[in-house]
């Protein structure tokens, strides 16, 4: 009798386990946090995109336990900067602990509170970014996209995780604000004339958009 595996599990089997990120996941579980970090395959993609774009200033919306933060920081140059927005102080504290253990504590800055408030503050400070990773409350994804475009340097990359919402987004009977807003976000990535977008269906779905120059 053969055991069925997903395409993602099959491809993931070609990679060696990432012990550092496995410890991050263990820390997330130990602190009773939701196990909703970016998929391992997309984590590697984050690192690669930061590296190949030469991004020096990256904005993350949603820190959780630091998994995606480490993936983003791995692609930064030594003088690169990751600004991470997190609603909960305890999540940011754990994320900073993990990111510091990975050797990137000097590259990351955490801002605590409502992400929309932090985004307004960054705009008031005149901050601009080369790459964005959105992985926070789904009901605000369209708002986060607008802010990312506003804070983007020409040619910046914007990524958004969980497009499929574990099947809810593709279910025509699924209702609710979060589902509606995620569908609007996905449509914007595909059709907004300010963006060049790609939608990846693997794992829980990932949007990648380039801000037109």
Image (cartoon, rainbow, N blue to C red):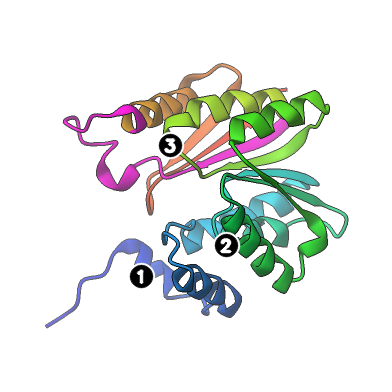
Q: Is residue 164 magenta?
A: yes
Q: Which residue is mark 1?
A: 10
The image position of residue 130, as x and y in percent, is 74, 38
Q: CA distance from mark 2 to mark 1?
A: 22 Å
The quarter in which the N terminus is drawn is bottom left
Above-or-below relation of 137 to 42: above
Which of the two marks, 2 or 1, is nearer to us in this view?
A: 2
Q: Which residue is mark 3?
A: 138
Residue situated in front as seen by the camera: 68 or 131: 68
Q: Which residue is mark 2?
A: 67
The residue located at (54%, 55%) in the rendering is: 64
Which is nearer the N-term, disc 2 or disc 1? Answer: 1
Q: Say few, some or many: other residues with alpha carbon within 10 Å of mark 3 (under 14 / 14 to 19 / 20 or more).
A: many
Q: Quadrant of residue 95?
A: bottom right
Q: Look at the image and tell me whether residue 94 can be seen.
A: yes
Which is nearer the N-term, disc 2 or disc 3? Answer: 2
The residue located at (61%, 19%) in the rendering is: 194
Residue situated in front as seen by the camera: 19 or 4: 19
Q: Look at the image and tell me whether residue 212 can be seen.
A: no
Which of the two marks, 1 or 3, is nearer to us in this view?
A: 3
Residue situated in front as seen by the camera: 202 or 64: 64
The quarter in which the C terminus is drawn is top right
Q: Residue furthest top?
A: 193
Q: Say few, some or many: other residues with alpha carbon within 10 Å of mark 1 (under 14 / 14 to 19 / 20 or more).
A: few
Q: CA distance from mark 1 to mark 3?
A: 29 Å
Q: Secondary structure at mark 3?
A: helix
């Amino acid at each position: 009798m053969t055991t069925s595996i997903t395409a993602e599990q099959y491809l993931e089997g070609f990679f060696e386990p990432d012990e550092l990120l496995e410890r991050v996941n263990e820390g997330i579980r130990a602190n009773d946090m939701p196990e909703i970090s970016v998929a391992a395959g997309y984590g590697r993609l984050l690192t690669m995109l930061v590296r190949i774009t030469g991004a020096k200033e990256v904005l993350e919306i949603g820190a959780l336990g630091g998994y995606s933060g480490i993936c983003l920081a791995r692609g930064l140059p030594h003088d690169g900067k990751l600004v991470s927005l997190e609603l909960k102080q305890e999540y940011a504290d754990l994320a900073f602990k993990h990111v510091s253990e990975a050797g990137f504590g000097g590259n990351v800055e955490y801002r605590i509170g409502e992400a929309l408030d932090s985004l307004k503050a960054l705009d008031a400070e005149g901050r601009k970014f080369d790459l964005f990773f959105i992985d926070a409350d789904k009901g605000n994804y369209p708002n986060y996209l607008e802010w990312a475009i506003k804070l983007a340097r020409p040619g910046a990359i914007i990524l958004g995780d969980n497009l499929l919402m574990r099947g809810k987004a593709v279910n025509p009977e699924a209702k609710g604000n979060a589902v509606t807003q995620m569908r609007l976000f996905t449509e914007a990535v595909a059709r907004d004339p300010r963006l060049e977008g790609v939608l990846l269906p693997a794992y829980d779905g990932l949007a990648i958009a380039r801000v037109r120059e």
